[in-house]
């Protein structure tokens, strides 16, 4: 099996860990992206290179644990060439792992330990894509202006209010405890320690404006640990693990009751289910 075949491919990359531990990773990531812009400029069928996330508009977040997230914008008719082959990436550095993780792009690991996730779009497809504003790393002279922010950013939801998030969290606890009593502990864990926690994070986002902006519009838990310290959000109690659904549900219920008015009927039902689990 070739490393860059259309299926999972794994290789021993002991050298990767060594390479990744040396040098200034943020600077290497930015240089790799700049070098990619040079490669694309020489191909003739590429229009632009957009950096996203910590190598895009949020450079302040760039650190030793960042990776390369980017879009390559290409001429109509050129997209499949970029999807079928990674020769354009291998002009930068040898690739030891490559996986087509979507119909639009791949995840790759370079031999020096830098990891990348990318998608390839035409201009028309980019306008229909959902992504936060990025950064133009390189653009062809005739590329349309504004590509870094031409996608669809999620608009306000009718559920973007604290009451909805509160009630949804409570119902997650209720359903989750029933799942645990049924013996579906994994499903219970996800309801109580994942779904309900997501709703609590959004609740805090709506009720704690001083906590800072959400790091990722599409992934609510990104940066939550920094935005809400343990004095505000005791995640160790709200997500203690697979074997502790009962404790997690009671901790979240108590946390919510200390912050807002909770439906007493639903709260009593949750406590009754927790009592049944303890028996």
Image: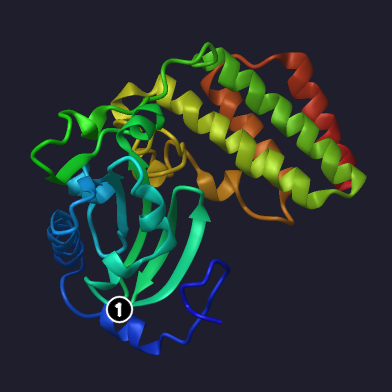
Task: Report the residue marked by disc 1.
Answer: 94
Residue 158 lies left or right of residue 86; in this view the side is right
The residue drawn where x is 59% and y is 16% is 164
The answer to whether residue 108 of the structure is visible from this angle is: yes
Residue 188 lies left or right of residue 150; in this view the side is right
Q: Position of residue 113 (x, y in %)?
A: 32, 75
The residue drawn where x is 77% and y is 46% is 187
Which one is in front, 6 or 117?
6
Q: Position of residue 270 (x, y in %)?
A: 78, 29
Mark 1 neighbour density, 10 Å: few (under 14) some (14–19) many (20 or more) = few
Which one is in front, 219 or 245?
219
The answer to whether residue 52 of the structure is visible from this angle is: no
The residue drawn where x is 45% and y is 48% is 104
Residue 160 lies left or right of residue 213; in this view the side is right
Q: Residue furthest left?
A: 141
Q: Secondary structure at mark 1?
A: loop
Q: Quadrant of residue 163?
A: top right
Which one is in front, 271 or 80?
80
Q: Residue furthest front?
A: 77
Where does the N terminus fall, quadrant-wise? bottom right
Q: Position of residue 267 (x, y in %)?
A: 74, 23
Q: Position of residue 184 (x, y in %)?
A: 84, 48
């Amino acid at each position: 099996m070739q490393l860059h075949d259309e299926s999972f491919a794994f290789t021993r990359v002991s050298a990767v860990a060594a390479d990744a531990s040396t040098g200034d990773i943020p600077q290497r990531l930015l240089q790799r992206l700049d070098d990619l812009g040079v490669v694309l400029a020489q191909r003739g069928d590429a229009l632009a290179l957009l950096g996203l996330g910590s190598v895009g508009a949020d450079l302040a977040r760039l650190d030793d644990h960042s990776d390369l997230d980017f879009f390559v914008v290409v001429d109509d008719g050129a997209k499949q060439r970029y999807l079928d082959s990674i020769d354009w990436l291998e002009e930068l550095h040898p690739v030891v792992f490559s996986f087509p993780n979507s119909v639009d792009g791949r995840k790759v690991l370079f031999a020096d330990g830098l990891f990348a996730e990318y998608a390839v779009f035409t201009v028309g497809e980019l306008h229909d894509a959902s992504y936060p504003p990025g950064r133009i790393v390189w653009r062809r002279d005739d590329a349309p202006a504004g590509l870094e922010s031409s996608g669809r950013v999620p608009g306000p939801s009718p559920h973007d209010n604290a009451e909805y998030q509160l009630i949804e969290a409570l119902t997650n606890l209720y359903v989750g405890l029933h799942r645990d009593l049924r013996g579906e502990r994994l499903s219970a864990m996800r309801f109580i320690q994942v779904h309900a926690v997501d709703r609590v994070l959004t609740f805090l986002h709506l009720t704690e404006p001083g906590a800072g902006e959400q790091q990722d519009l599409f992934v609510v838990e990104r940066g939550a640990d920094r935005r809400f310290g343990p004095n505000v959000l005791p995640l160790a109690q709200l997500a203690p693990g697979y074997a502790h659904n009962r404790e997690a549900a009671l901790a979240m219920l108590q946390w919510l009751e200390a912050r807002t008015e909770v439906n007493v009927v639903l709260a009593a039902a949750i406590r009754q289910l927790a009592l049944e689990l303890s028996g």
